[in-house]
Image (cartoon, rainbow, N blue to C red):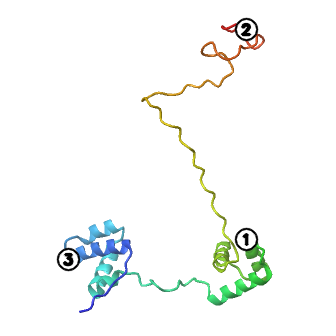
Amino acid sequence: MTKEHITMSHKEIDRLEMIQAVANKHLRQAEAAQRLGLSVRQVKRLVRRYREHGATGLRSGHRGRRPNNAIAETVRQEVLALVKTHYTDFGPTLACEKLAERHGHHLSVETLRQWMVADGLWQPKQRKQARIHQRRPRRPCLGELIQIDGSPHDWFEVRGRAVPSWCSSTTPQGA
């Protein structure tokens, strides 16, 4: 007997465990529906598919297929050829506008940008590296802090230069 390998996502594996529990009558359909976030009707449908096809019946049928709204490869090649010949020094946004205006190709900017990056026509911008701030060294005693008075005024003790008399009505203590 040959073993068949089935590729499933984590969501599909969780769904398989619930459906197996329902099929073995260890879990009720309503409880499984609530846990999976589905209706009872959908759970019944999944149990029926599980009994007919096994674990492969719960896999997505669209795996490995092109999406229905995918742009055709011929259109992609035509657009890239136009960009190479007419818009080599354009960015994706301006190139997309010119393609729509002059050639009738209406694409999203992000689609054109991804095509240009894949074809080597556009270099994506590098993200800035986060600046790492050096932490201050730990003090040897718990709770000890360095007290720094950056004020030019004589606020706390007799230190710093004296405040001119025209600045305040009282004379400084150190004068």
What residue type is disc 1 on?
A: Thr
What residue type is disc 2 on?
A: Ser
Tell me which numbered mark, 2 or 1, is placed earlier along the sequence.
1
Tell me which numbered mark, 2 or 3, is placed earlier along the sequence.
3
The residue to which callout 1 is attached is 93
Instruction: Where is residue 82? Give x, y as percent.
Output: 75, 84
Frontmost of labels 1 and 3 is: 1
Say which of 121 and 47 sits in front: 121
Splitting the image into 4 quarters, where does residue 168 fall? top right
The residue to which callout 2 is attached is 169
Q: Which mark is residue 24?
A: 3
Question: How far is mark 2 from mark 1, CA to CA?
Answer: 65 Å
Splitting the image into 4 quarters, where does residue 114 fall? bottom right
Frontmost of labels 2 and 3 is: 2
- Hey, which residue is sitting farthest bottom in the picture? 1
Residue at (53% x, 41% y) in the render? 135
| 124 to 160, vertically: above or below | below
| 40 to 168, vertically: above or below | below
Q: Secondary structure at mark 1?
A: helix
Instruction: Where is residue 116? Give x, y as percent.
Output: 67, 77
Q: Which mark is residue 113?
A: none
Frontmost of labels 2 and 1 is: 2
Say which of 175 and 48 sits in front: 175
Instruction: Where is residue 60? Give x, y as percent.
Output: 41, 81
Question: How far is mark 1 from mark 3, CA to CA?
Answer: 56 Å
Other residues around mark 2 within 10 Å, as few (<14) / some (14–19) / many (≥20): few
Residue at (35% x, 71% y) in the render? 39
Instruction: Where is residue 42? Give x, y as percent.
Output: 34, 76
Residue at (60% x, 50% y) in the render? 131
What residue type is disc 3 on?
A: Asn
The reply, left or right, for residue 94 in relation to residue 128 is: right
Residue at (23% x, 92% y) in the render? 1
